Amino acid sequence: MPELPEIETIKNELSPWLRGQNFTQVIIFDPKIIFNAPVKEFCHQLIMQKVEKIDRRGKYLLFNLTSKQVLIMHLRMTGALLLNPNRIDSYARAAFNFSNGIQVVFSDRRRLGILYLVQNANTVVGKLGPEPLGENFTPITLAKILKKHHIPVKAALIDQNLIAGIGNMYADEILFAARINPLRKADVLSSQEIQTLHHCIHETLWPAIADKGASVDTYTRPSGQFGTAQFNFKVAHRYGETCAICNTPLQRVSVRGRGSHFCPHCQPSA
């Protein structure tokens, strides 16, 4: 968290405010947020640069600047970008002021988020897999990815080097929608199951974007408002409840160290 729908929401909601605006002040409260650069140099390079556009790549936000540099933000587990917050609290790690009077604060309770300022974005995001909502991400593309890996399909979905942007909770929702057990091996799924899985990736992520992401922990939109995608969750974050389809108690297993929620009746192991 946040995952693709949350980062896409942040991108969409910040873009109208920041596109075409110059950085006028950069304040770093926690130097550890900057990857491999002195604070003064980082701030100096940003001042008076204009934001040409904001893109998303996987779970990363990319601010494309007039200097052709790219400011990349990775919010990690608990990061948030807040638009004109009423106050700057102890979780603030950086603040960015813009020529239109807008301030964006990078807040992060666990201090895991990171900033990069690079000439080539691929030095940071170049190893990511394809975008699951991109035009080139077809069922054939998905099949080629899965057939190469004898790992649980849940592990394949959340491996950012295989597919960019899908995280733990949306992988659970996708697999439930596809009626595929998270422990099934990726390379044994049938062609029909892969077709269904591809369809369910779209049918899960697009509505979550429309709902402005899921506020299940620390995620808020830049305005401070909550997303509502979590109200449509069938299995994610619902351990201890029963399946909305068959009333079977939902189960939780660990897949590569990540808690995975599923319905044993709707998602049989074989």
Image (cartoon, helix red, strand yellow):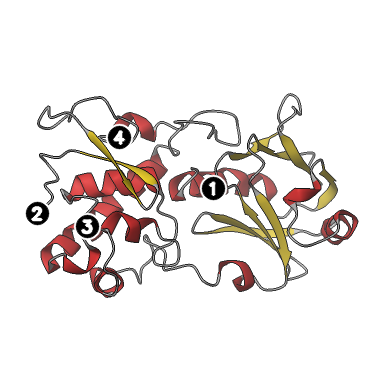
Secondary element under disc 2, as helix, strand or loop, is loop
Q: Determine which quarter of the picture holds residue 90.
A: top right
Q: Alpha carbon of mark 3 to alpha carbon of mark 4: how far?
A: 17 Å
Sequence-first disc among 1 and 4: 1
How busy is the neighbourhood of tag 3: few (under 14 within 10 Å), some, or many (20 plus)? many
**Which residue is under mark 1?**
12
Amino acid under disc 2:
Ala
Amino acid marked by disc 1: Asn
Discs 2/4, front: 2
- Residue at 55 percent across and 72 percent down: it is 126
Q: Which residue is mark 4?
A: 233
Identify the residue under disc 3: 197
List x then y, in percent, for residue 253. Answer: 28, 42
- Residue 196: x and y in percent read 17, 58
Mark earlier in primary sequence (2, 1): 1
Image-based side of 113 in relation to 47, left or right: left
